[in-house]
Image (cartoon, helix red, strand yellow):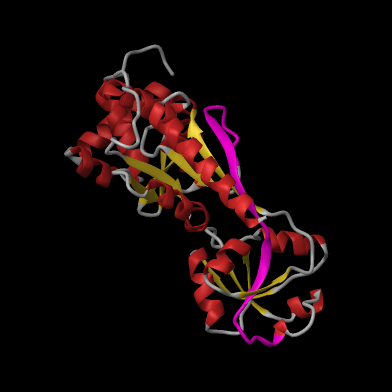
Amino acid sequence: MRGQKLDLNLYRVFEAIYQEGSLTRAGEVLNMTQPAVSNALTRLRAAYDDPLFVRRGRGVSPTPRSESIAADVAQALRLLGGGLAPRAAFEPARAERRFRIGGGDLSSALVLPSLLEALAGTHLRLEVQVYERRRIVHALAGGEIDLALDALPLPDPQLLTTKLMEDRFVCALRAGHAALSGKLTLARYLGLGHVHASARPRGLGQVDMALKGLGEQRRIVVRTSHHLGLPFLVRQTDLAASIPQRLADAHQLSTRPLPFEMPPLAVHAIWHRRTEHDKANRWLRELLASVQLERGAAAT
């Protein structure tokens, strides 16, 4: 960045554009006209000698330079807004607080039911939102969410991670399915029609990567972005779904071991370094870990 001071309001414009992906929507959020937003962005571009945002369809996408400063900008704005105030001790039995968690439907479904049981009788609430992986760092740094749940640790020095659980993948089928008779061999598995869930519109998932290593490919009949829709599709069709055992059990589906080796699904809790010693955040992390440990012990 060139050696010059910038008006704090310019960074508020940057934050709004980054969050909304649109100059028009950023203006609406900030109650600014579009020319004023454009003028602010022009000044930022000159200061950073970078476009910062480039047009994509009807909106804009951040450049690598924007991505590199977004988390710092969000944290600075949050601290200037009062985030440096000292925090009192956290008393879960008396606290009235909303914890905000970023996580996909699968991670949330596997982890949160046990957490909700542990929160029963308190005045604590949960708000769960779906975030693209590329936005999790920014969301944690800016205080939009307290924790994130993800299958993989995120390789960013600002973040800390702990593994909450692992679960094996199984082949889930409806009751009475013909494939339940006898052993489910690789040939029989590949002969089935499959339903697959992924947040990405294309590309291979974990199961398909394992099959690719064997030189094999399954026949995917349905591809969806909603993991929790898979059990309902399986229950009412002859399709198979390769899903975690815990999800299959929750929907009372019949299962068979996968006829090939693949790593288990993991769910990690991810938080920002600045909240490492935050009493409420730490209590939530420890509670998540303890209820998953208890559930794992009960299952063995």
Q: 262 left or right of 121?
A: right
Queried whether the magenta region covers residue 157, the answer comes back as yes
User: Foreground residue, 20 or 156?
Assistant: 156
Q: Which residues are magenta?
A: 153-178
Question: x%, y% of residue 40?
Answer: 27, 30
Residue 44: image location, x then y, percent: 35, 26
Which residue is at 62% across, 65% downward? 243
Q: Quadrant of the C terminus?
A: bottom right
Picture quarter containing residue 216? bottom right
**Number of marks:** 0
Instruction: Work out whether 285 lies above or below 47.
Output: below
Farthest residue in the right direction?
214
Does residue 247 appear anywhere in the picture? yes
Residue ID at (37%, 33%):
143
Q: Is residue 276 left or right of residue 85?
A: right
Q: Is residue 273 above or below residue 220?
A: above
**Front residue (pair 268, 78):** 268
Describe residue 221's horizontal placement relative to residue 4 as left or right.
Answer: right
Instruction: Check residue 22 for magenta coloring.
Output: no
Looking at this view, is 174 or 150 the one in front?
174
Question: Residue 144's spot in the image, x, y percent?
Answer: 36, 38
Residue 31 % position (x, y): 16, 39
Residue 199 higher or lower than 275, as above or below: below
Query: Depth check: 295 or 97 in front?
Result: 295
Residue at screen point 32% across, 30% down: 42
Q: Residue at x 60, y 83 (%)?
A: 175
The N terminus sits in image quarter: top left
Q: Quadrant of residue 217?
A: bottom right
- Residue 136 lies, with reference to residue 103, above or below; the image says above
